[in-house]
């Protein structure tokens, strides 16, 4: 019975990660069509993306608040429902206030799902006794690639905006289905709400040092991720002068490497442990970004972006998994706070690289994510040194705690 419960919980959480990745890719890659439909300029689109990041950070705290009262499963269902409500409003032509409000609502749901899916993933892998987050994040990445392809196919149609609306409507239905699947699972691990009559404050302070350490790791990773996602195609096309069909290959190579690494991350964590895996990933990422900055050749840039993706694929699951074990009784709160660094890194990566693009150029600008990720070497000792199989309820002894 327990094995069946764990399998059902694993499938539900994987479904939530998949719905999240698909939804984010569809929304982001649909921005040009939405921009045309609403008649807004590039500045407005940039402000929308920034607003989504800000509201997503708020959504992470919202997930924490809901998790304290209804458990992280309730927070995940709520976040999925918020996105499912927002997406039809985004898909349909609407006045500017409604359109912008829909993106704010989507941002809240995005942050809530980012945080609560990681909370659920940590609880599930603790109950399972073995790393699972790599596989969950692989589901997210694979769905994101599929979402981008779906939007590309919709854009090729003559009536691309109606096709886009239908795609988003189907996605909203998928989010509702994921919410139902998650809410239908039994509790496969003890939720981290305090016992009756016991407040969180009465159990002592949160491990703030560990939160800042793993938050800094997440921030560095998303500085890299945002820099590659935002500027890799621009760099290849504008700075290196490649033909139009080659330019997206840098980002494509990055995403394929992320997916391949995430599919292997859980196995690597069991074999070599988080500390060695993170150290190796950091070196690979720094080398990849440095190659992009130092070698103004398209093949070298694409290879560099792929190396960066291989590192990103491992670092995110390892950081969230280790953060969740700082204090197993309060892992939801810890993950909600660490997740906020995700959006800070995303904004810094896009903006900092863009600012340098107007001065020295995009090539040296990729030294920013190289330095940010290389700095994680100073924090590697915070990760568990040896490969560990977690028994339900166990705590990984960690110097960051």
Image: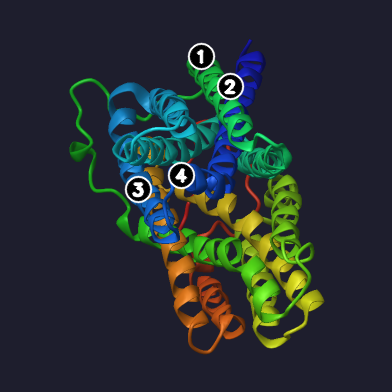
Q: Earlier in the sequence, mark 1 or mark 2?
A: 2
Decide if residue 25 is in sight here: yes
Q: In which quarter of the image is residue 348?
A: bottom left
Which residue has dot 4 on it?
324
Whether residue 146 sits left or right of residue 125 in the image: it is right
Q: What residue is drawn where x is 31% and y is 29%?
A: 66
Sequence-first disc among 2 and 3: 2
Q: Quadrant location of residue 377?
A: bottom right
User: Are there few (<14), some (14-19), or many (20+) residues within 10 Å of tag 3?
Assistant: many
Between 194 and 66, which is closer to the camera in this rendering? 66
Q: Is mark 4 on a helix, strand or loop?
A: helix
Q: How far apart are marks 3 and 1 (CA)?
A: 28 Å
Residue 231 higher or lower than 260, as above or below: below
Check residue 9 in the rendering and tell me which mark sits there, or answer none.
2
Q: How crowded is mark 2: few (under 14 residues within 10 Å), some or many (20 or more)?
A: many
Q: Residue 57, labelled with which disc?
A: 3
Label 4 to label 2: alpha-carbon separation: 18 Å
Say whether marks 3 and 1 touch (CB < 8 Å): no
Q: Name the residue under label 1.
A: 186
Q: In this view, does 128 lie above or below 209?
A: above
Residue 271 on image: x %, y %: 74, 52
Give coordinates of residue 127: x percent, y percent.
56, 29
Q: Is residue 22 left or right of residue 108?
A: right
Cα distance between the residues tagged 2 and 3: 26 Å
Q: Where is residue 101 in the image (x, y as percent from the top left)?
A: 32, 37
């Amino acid at each position: 019975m327990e094995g069946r419960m764990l399998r059902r919980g694993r499938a539900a959480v994987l479904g939530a990660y998949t719905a999240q990745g698909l939804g984010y890719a569809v929304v982001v890659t649909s921005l040009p069509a939405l921009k045309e439909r609403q008649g807004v300029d590039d500045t407005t689109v940039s402000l929308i993306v920034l607003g989504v990041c800000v509201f997503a950070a708020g959504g992470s705290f919202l997930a924490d608040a809901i998790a304290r009262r209804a458990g992280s499963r309730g927070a995940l269902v709520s976040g999925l429902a918020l996105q499912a409500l927002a997406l039809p409003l985004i898909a349909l032509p609407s006045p500017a206030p409604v359109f912008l409000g829909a993106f704010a609502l989507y941002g809240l749901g995005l942050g809530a799902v980012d945080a609560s899916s990681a909370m659920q993933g940590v609880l599930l892998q603790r109950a399972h006794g073995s790393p699972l987050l790599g596989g969950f994040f692989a589901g997210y990445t694979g769905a994101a690639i599929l979402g981008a392809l779906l939007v590309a196919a919709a854009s090729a149609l003559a009536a691309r905006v109606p096709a886009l609306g239908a795609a988003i409507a189907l996605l909203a239905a998928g989010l509702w289905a994921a919410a139902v699947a998650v809410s239908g699972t039994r509790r496969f691990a003890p939720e981290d709400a305090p016992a009756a009559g016991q407040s969180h404050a009465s159990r002592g302070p949160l491990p703030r040092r560990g939160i800042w350490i793993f938050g800094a790791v997440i921030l560095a990773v998303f500085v890299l991720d945002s820099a590659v996602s935002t500027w890799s195609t621009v760099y290849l096309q504008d700075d290196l002068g490649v033909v139009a069909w080659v330019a997206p290959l840098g980002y494509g190579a990055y995403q394929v490497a992320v997916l391949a690494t995430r599919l292997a991350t859980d196995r690597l964590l069991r074999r070599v442990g988080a500390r060695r895996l993170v150290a190796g990933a950091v070196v690979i990422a720094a080398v990849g970004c440095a190659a992009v900055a130092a070698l103004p050749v398209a093949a070298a840039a694409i290879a560099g972006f792929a190396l960066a993706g291989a590192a990103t694929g491992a670092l995110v699951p390892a950081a969230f998994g280790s953060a969740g074990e700082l204090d197993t009784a309060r892992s939801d709160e810890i993950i909600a706070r660490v997740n906020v660094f995700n959006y800070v890194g995303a904004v810094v990566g896009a903006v900092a690289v863009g600012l340098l693009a107007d001065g020295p150029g995009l090539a040296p600008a990729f030294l920013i994510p190289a330095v940010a990720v290389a700095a994680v070497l100073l924090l590697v000792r915070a990760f568990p040194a040896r490969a560990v199989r977690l028994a339900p309820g166990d705590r990984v002894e960690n110097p960051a705690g």
